[in-house]
């Protein structure tokens, strides 16, 4: 009996197995699942088909997300520094060239201490530090634009970026309430007219956009928008046209207009700058007209350079009042007449150390001038002065005077009074105090 029962179970098992095999064969290949068949000790048969109506294994929980590796606001000295950090990190992603690996230091939370080029101070009437100045001078960083960086730092007071490769336009910085120094010299800023948004920086003491590709005329606002400006450097661009008539209204101390394409006369308003202008460069433009009498009224000027232009006429007698001048360059113009003896005497009763008049058409020298030639303080090469060395040929001089109309007035009025020769002690003290800033305009002729 037991054998019959066992055979019956076996037959039933075989029948069920064949049915299952048939079903599995006709199903899609993508749904093939393992089949489990077992015979229990009690004689029962158990069949399981994976993916069928049976219970599926429990789902695994995803691993917990790791905390963000980016610094959070609470990691910084204050909220101002944190916001500056976010701006810096955005700008960092735009840097396409960094030969000195400067941006490698722009990591972590110590913005004020370890980030090269960034400096922090407390803004006026604020009790916490903020990002106050950026100094990228000489870093050679390259980015297509500064927009969204400089203008996004609301506490910024200074931005110096000489000798980099920044492109695009000058950002609009009018909203920066503390801003007073801008240096974008020697970059790759997009060729465009003077960036008039700069005129909104009324607290500026330093405006430097030299060695770029700006063109067109200078706006009159450049000389009336900055009541406390000390330096304006726009040299080595492609500016052209006449200089604004209000040039002398600016309180600027150091003014460099050199190496552009300015035309027309030097504005007579420059006389208004008599007590403020210390150095001025008109060098290497296309300025024309008569050499202005008003230049001789710049009582505090130490550098006056109008060389390599098209200025004509005689040297006005007012130039004898330039007792503070050290460097006076009028070379390579169309000047003529006699070099005044009173001008050369400034080497004895003033501070004159270099008087350059070469490349003109002067025909005579004052008595003291001959001594300055021997001392190496006066250069009159390539003029028409009899007995002076290295002069133009007779034919060249004759040709100039034949075709030149002598229409400029001859000024003989000396508007100052010299008490005597020699340099007073007060003047020497003032000169010593100014040594730190000596010849800033000539330094601006280098990138």
Image: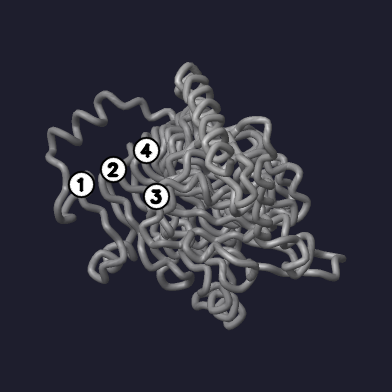
Q: Do the residues labelled 4 and 2 touch (CB within 8 Å)?
A: no
In percent of width and height, residue 73 lies at 76, 61
Residue 160, horizontal then vertical, whole percent: 55, 56
Q: Mark 3 points at which residue?
A: 97
Q: Spatial distance from mark 3 to mark 1, Cα to Cα?
A: 48 Å
Which residue is depicted at the point 47% across and 33% down? 190
- Label 4 to label 1: alpha-carbon separation: 16 Å
Which sits earlier in the primary sequence, circle 1 or circle 2?
A: 2
Quick check: can you spot residue 289? Answer: no
Residue 438 visible in the snapshot: yes
Q: Where is residue 44 in the image (x, y as percent from the top left)?
A: 64, 42
Task: From the viewer's side, name the closer residue of 7 and 359.
Answer: 7
Which circle marks residue 360 in the picture? 2
| Residue in the image at 51% along x and 74% along y | 435
Q: In this view, does 14 lie above or below 170?
A: above
Element type at marker 1?
Answer: loop
N-terminal of the two: label 3 or label 2? 3
Residue drawn at 31 percent across, 27 percent down: 404
State the residue position of label 1: 382
Q: How crowded is mark 3: few (under 14 residues within 10 Å), some or many (20 or more)?
A: some
Where disc 2 sits, the SS reads loop
For disc 4, the marked residue is: 309
| First-in-chain label (4 vs 1) | 4
- Labelled pair 1, 2 in contact (Cβ < 8 Å): yes
Q: Which of marks 4 and 2 is in front?
A: 4
């Amino acid at each position: 009996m037991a054998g019959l029962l066992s055979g019956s179970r076996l037959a039933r098992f075989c029948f069920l197995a064949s049915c299952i095999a048939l079903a599995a064969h006709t199903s899609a290949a993508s749904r093939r699942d393992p089949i489990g068949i077992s015979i229990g000790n009690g004689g029962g048969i158990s069949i399981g088909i994976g993916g069928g109506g049976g219970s599926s294994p429990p789902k695994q929980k995803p691993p917990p997300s790791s905390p963000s590796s980016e610094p959070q606001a609470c990691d910084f000295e204050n909220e101002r520094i944190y916001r500056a950090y976010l701006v810096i990190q955005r700008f960092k992603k735009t840097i396409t060239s960094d030969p000195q690996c400067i941006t490698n230091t722009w990591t972590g939370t110590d913005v004020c201490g370890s980030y090269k080029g960034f400096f922090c101070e407390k803004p006026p009437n604020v009790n916490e530090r903020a990002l106050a100045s950026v100094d990228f001078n000489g870093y050679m960083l390259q980015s297509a634009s500064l927009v969204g960086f400089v203008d996004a730092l609301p506490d910024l007071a200074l931005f110096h970026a000489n000798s980099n490769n920044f492109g695009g336009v000058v950002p609009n910085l009018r909203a920066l309430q503390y801003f007073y120094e801008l240096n974008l010299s020697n970059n790759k800023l997009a060729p465009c007219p003077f960036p008039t948004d700069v005129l909104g920086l009324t607290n500026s003491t330093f405006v430097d956009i030299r060695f770029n590709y700006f063109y067109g005329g200078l706006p009159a606002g450049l000389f009336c928008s900055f009541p406390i400006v000390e330096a304006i450097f726009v040299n080595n661009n492609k500016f052209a046209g006449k200089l604004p008539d209000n040039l002398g209204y600016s309180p600027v101390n150091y003014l460099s207009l050199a190496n552009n394409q300015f035309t027309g006369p030097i504005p007579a308003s420059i006389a208004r700058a008599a007590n403020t202008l210390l150095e001025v460069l008109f060098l290497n433009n296309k300025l024309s007209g008569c050499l202005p009498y008003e230049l001789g009224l710049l009582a505090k000027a130490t550098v006056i350079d109008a060389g390599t232009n098209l200025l004509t006429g005689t040297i006005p007698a007012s130039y004898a009042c330039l007792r503070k001048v050290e460097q006076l360059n009028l070379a390579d113009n169309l000047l003529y007449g006699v070099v005044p003896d009173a001008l050369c005497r400034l080497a004895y009763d003033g501070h004159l150390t270099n008087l350059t008049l070469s490349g003109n058409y002067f025909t005579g020298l004052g008595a003291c001038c001959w001594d300055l030639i021997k001392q190496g303080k006066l250069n009159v090469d390539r003029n028409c002065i009899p007995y002076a060395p290295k002069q133009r040929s007779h034919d060249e001089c004759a040709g100039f005077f034949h075709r030149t109309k002598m229409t400029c007035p001859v000024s003989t009025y000396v508007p100052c009074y010299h008490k005597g020769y020699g340099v007073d002690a007060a003047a020497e003290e003032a000169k010593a105090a100014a040594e730190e800033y000596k010849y800033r305009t000539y330094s601006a002729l280098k990138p």
